[in-house]
Amino acid sequence: MSKQIIIAEQHRLAAVISEDQIQELIVASGSYQISDVYLGIVENVLPGIDAAFINLGDATQNGFIHVTDLGPLRLRRSAGAITELLTPQQKVLVQVMKEPTGNKGPRLTGNISLPGRYLVLMPFGRGVNLSRRILSEAERHRLRALAILVKPAGMGLLVRTEAEGVAEEAILEDLEALQRQWETIQQQAQSTRAPALLGRDDDFVQRVLRDVYSSDVNRIVVDVPESVKRVKQNLMAWNESKLPVGVLIDYHQEAIPILDYFRVNAAIREALKPRVDLPSGGYVIIEPTEALTVIDVNSGSFTRSATARETVLWTNCEAATEIARQLKLRNLAGVIIVDFIDMDTRRDQLQLLEHFSKALRADKARPQIAQLSELGLVELTRKRQGQNIYELFGRPCRSCGGLGHLVHLPGYPDDSPGEIVERVIPPRIIETRSRPLEVQNRPELGSGNGIELQLTNHPGYQEVSSSRRRSTRPRVSNGISSPPGQAPTPSRSLPRRGRPDSTPPLDVTATVAKTARTEAAPATTSRIVLPETPRSETGSRPSRKPTPRPRTIEPPEHINVTMTTVEQDVYALMGISPLVLYTGDVKSPRNTIVSVAAPGQAPVPPPAISRAAIPGQRGEEPASGYAPEEVASQEFHDAVKSPLESLSVVEPAVMNPALDVMLPQALETESAPIIETSLESETPESLAVGVRRRRRRTTGGDEQLSFGTEIR
């Protein structure tokens, strides 16, 4: 069975691939690693649990050592309580045997062991031990005799599996290297101030090759060019200065990262999931808990066997092989409970246990099957070797905090109020330039001075106007101060639709000073602070004085439409333009004169329009302030009146004695000083003087009359 070793030295991660599957992961990360040798200081001693905490230089975590792991300290003195063996502020030489997990610090031991390629030197140990994987009795006798001869006095030796069939010279060289390493540690312990790190396997490539390289490895891939040379040096040192035959050493030069190219990251991602699918259609569920790891086997969709007994046995054997691989890949340790599918016969149970034990033999952590319980549960234990895959690559869920589910209580919403973060939007500051306000003395409407306003002459407007009321609209204040003792009333300017850009809209204020003459003030710049609120349908942005631009407007197009009297009334009531009855092409509906004639009546000739009546021909603005389309389509507006026209805002008006009406006239005024205001809700009661404006157009002759407010 050929193997490949993938070494990602930049990430301190290595993987062993066999049969196109990731079999094992080697990760060297974290502040504490297995086999690290420290010179620590006893922080405190706890006689209640026969343990002590050792300061290793990390203020957040202390190492934990039990009285049974003291090693040479316990051998030098008679057996007794831990308080007789350790005292606070005492210096001790310890080694990390288990990496920290969760809130627990690293597990320490006083029995120092220095691993090599073929031997493990134990400075405080005794005797000679051999690996259980060496099965040949002749080889075991040879290695035991050699170890007894070369063992240093007062130390112990452990012969590793890799020493099987190796020459004596290579084993002696490995032993000499371990002795030099131990002497260096002793010298540093005498001269270094505690707490301090004295020994660590900094060469990650050497550590990987020492632990996982064997004769069945045929390829080694590294991600650093310098690592190729170190791999060759280590292999030649272990093989009599010659490279092993059949081993290919490659440097990864692909554009895809090495962990993605060999699907190592994909294997890690799949290993973090609880479900593992089997080739036959069954699946395995692996759930680690605080106390133990639970594994459940299910047949799934596997139904290809002839009988139910064969289906159950086949699925269990497949699951046993996959569970043995997952234990190594995920590095699960401690108590493990496997719930296989129930089997009726004792023969099938023994066959499954034999198959499971055979699959676990390749694991260096030496899993031990305890028993098959009466409930059909297989109990086994596995020695802990470093952190598992959940501790290395897993992170707690942000939503549930690692609980696995969210709490939903009756009577409470799904999202707790504390988790909802309200968005605070700062106010907007808009700088606007307003037009000077035009103020004049105007009496209130309906004061009984004899002037009655006829707002419309449309025959059907009475029915519509009875159900339609003009609503109060908010207005933006442009700096008019309120009378003394009254808070300023904000207002918003309303843009007039259908007006040209050359005539800016007037700012209607809530408070108008009643003076005989108009006082003027230069236009100033105001800063209005607007809160970030949705804009109402009736509101608009503050008015800004536009710059007049000369425009060229084409003469209006004249169109004749035939309509009966009834059709004219219906179209006028519904507000539909007679232009919809015209079948020809219209260049611009807004620049069109529509003449309505009864059936059989001669078409109305187009009216004569002088160049002075068309704005923009000589760069002049219209004198009356109306848009070109309004001047051009005057005849249509005279024929059809919409109720909305009576609600339009017009310019300030002055009294014409000849007509006894108020005609539009531009006033030379200046605005009052502008003050800073903020938008507030406006009510009719807050207005000092209610200003209402309406416009009326008559069809008599060429006169066009506009009605404003009455003058008292």
Image: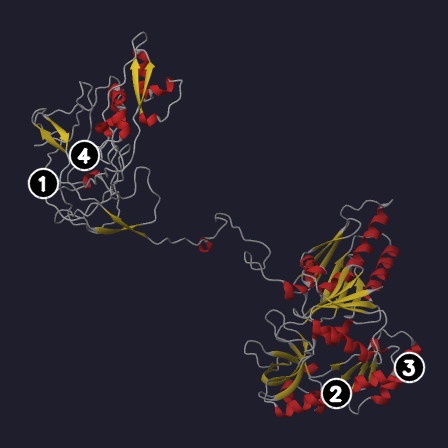
For this orientation, the residue located farthest to the right is 138
Q: Image quadrant of residue 435?
A: top left
- Report if the CB atoms under discs 1 and 2 are less than 8 Å apart: no
Give the total of numbered labels.
Answer: 4
Q: Secondary structure at mark 1?
A: loop
Q: Nearer the viewer, residue 136 or 242?
A: 242
x%, y% of residue 70?
69, 84
Residue placed under numbered mark 2 in the picture? 123
- Report if the CB atoms under discs 1 and 4 are less than 8 Å apart: no
Residue placed under numbered mark 4 in the picture? 651
Q: Nearer the viewer, residue 106 or 194?
A: 194
For this orientation, the residue located farthest to the top is 600
How much space separates mark 4 and mark 2, taking CA atoms?
107 Å
Q: Which mark is residue 514?
A: 1
Q: Mark 2 or mark 3, which is nearer the start of the sequence?
A: 2
Q: Quadrant of the C terminus?
A: top left
At 86% across and 61% down in the image, what residue appears? 354
x%, y% of residue 369?
80, 65
Q: Quadrant of the N terminus?
A: bottom right
Residue placed under numbered mark 3 in the picture? 141
Q: Mark 3 or mark 1, which is nearer the start of the sequence?
A: 3
How much space separates mark 3 and mark 4, taking CA atoms?
119 Å
Q: Nearer the viewer, mark 1 or mark 4?
A: 4
Q: Image quadrant of residue 578?
A: top left
Amino acid at the residue labelled 2: Pro
x%, y% of residue 154?
78, 91
At 86% across and 72% down in the image, what residue appears? 245
457 sits left or right of 86 in the view: left
How much space separates mark 3 and mark 2, taking CA atoms?
23 Å
Q: Secondary structure at mark 3?
A: helix
Q: Nearer the viewer, mark 1 or mark 3?
A: 1
How much space separates mark 1 and mark 4, taking CA atoms?
18 Å
